[in-house]
Amino acid sequence: MRRVLLFLTVAALALVGTSDSAIAASDITVRFAPALKYTGINSSSVKVDILIDNYHVPACDPTCGLDAYDLWVVFDPAVISYVSFVNGEFLGRTGNTPVCVAYPPSTPNVTGPNQARLQCTTWAPQHYGPRGSGTLATITFASPATTGTSTLTFDSRTELVTVYLGQYYRPAFEEGNGSVVVATLGSGDSDGDGCTDTKEVGYNPALGGWRNPFDANDFYDVPSPTLHDGGTLSNRDKVITSAKDLPAVLKYVSSYAGGPANSLGVDYDDLYSGKAEGLTYDRSNGVEWSGAPDGYISVIGDAMELLPQMGHDCR
């Protein structure tokens, strides 16, 4: 009987409860990661995480946290097909036991052909729910034998729920949409950044995954010795480290396209194989990792793009 009551309570969350209007939508984020997921054709395991950032409820901080959620994901079934939808580590982080029900597309009276739903609560909770950030869930798709792009969005019925002293709180949150791109992958390294296409579409960022196999800027491995010091592109070693890559980028700091040499005598516009040296060390903020050169190399704009990739290894 207790289990029945529990699931009745979960089902009622969308109908009963009080929103905490004191929580601005920008305080909490629910997003897909990676935001741009590449995969090859005929893949049976295209995993996309759903992350939660900065979950909190001011009305009962710091003693309360997330107790339940109801995720609705909308995708294009002509491009990708649903495989599974499972709970992540966040909901059970404080020691409570999550209980979840997944509804595949076209579940009668629940989901449409382009929707998947995951509803989770905690069984007989002994602790307050978690606050902060983590992995809320992981949804897995399969890709067909044709190429295409599917956007990933959250249906408006998606909810986050905290229960405290008999009061339901359903804070507003910002949504981060995503995309799955099904592409024809090469057998090697299509973008020449040191990571093979297979590694770049993988699930583990530390092994080169969560990247675009056609973007040479999202794996921040640079030549050391630097091109300025007589190095060559072959001095990239397919692993990003503080001992090699960071000093190399810092050597180019304060150099920029069309400008003079920096205080170390490094000129962005010195040519290597017909193009400016600085382009090899210059990055901007990308979709998931570092992005295309922006013409100026700085500590904040470039070295800080490298730091999140420290230790990433495509060997």
Image (cartoon, helix red, strand yellow):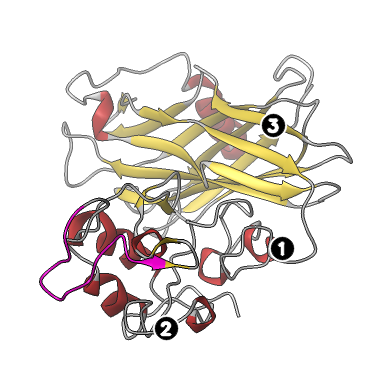
As shown in the figure, which amino acid type bears the numbered disc 3? Thr
Q: Is residue 268 above or below residue 231?
A: above
Residue 59 screen position, x and y as percent: 16, 31
Tell me if residue 95 is in the magenta stretch. no
Q: Secondary structure at mark 1?
A: helix
Amino acid type assigned to the residue bearing label 2 in the image: Gly
Q: Is residue 143 visible?
A: yes
Mark toward the start of the polypeptide (3 vs 1): 3
Badge 3: how crowded within 10 Å, few (<14), some, or many (20+)? some
Instruction: Using residue 307 as the reference point, say whether residue 117 is left or right of it.
Output: right
Q: Position of residue 213 (x, y in %)?
A: 63, 55
Q: Residue at x 43, y 52 (%)?
A: 90
Q: In terms of secondary structure, where does tag 3 sit?
A: strand
Please give the residue where the numbered disc 2 appears in the rendered image. Answer: 231
Q: How far apart are labels 3 and 1 at the CA level? A: 18 Å
Which residue has dot 1 on it? 198
- Identify the magenta region: 259-271
Residue that mark 3 sits on? 149
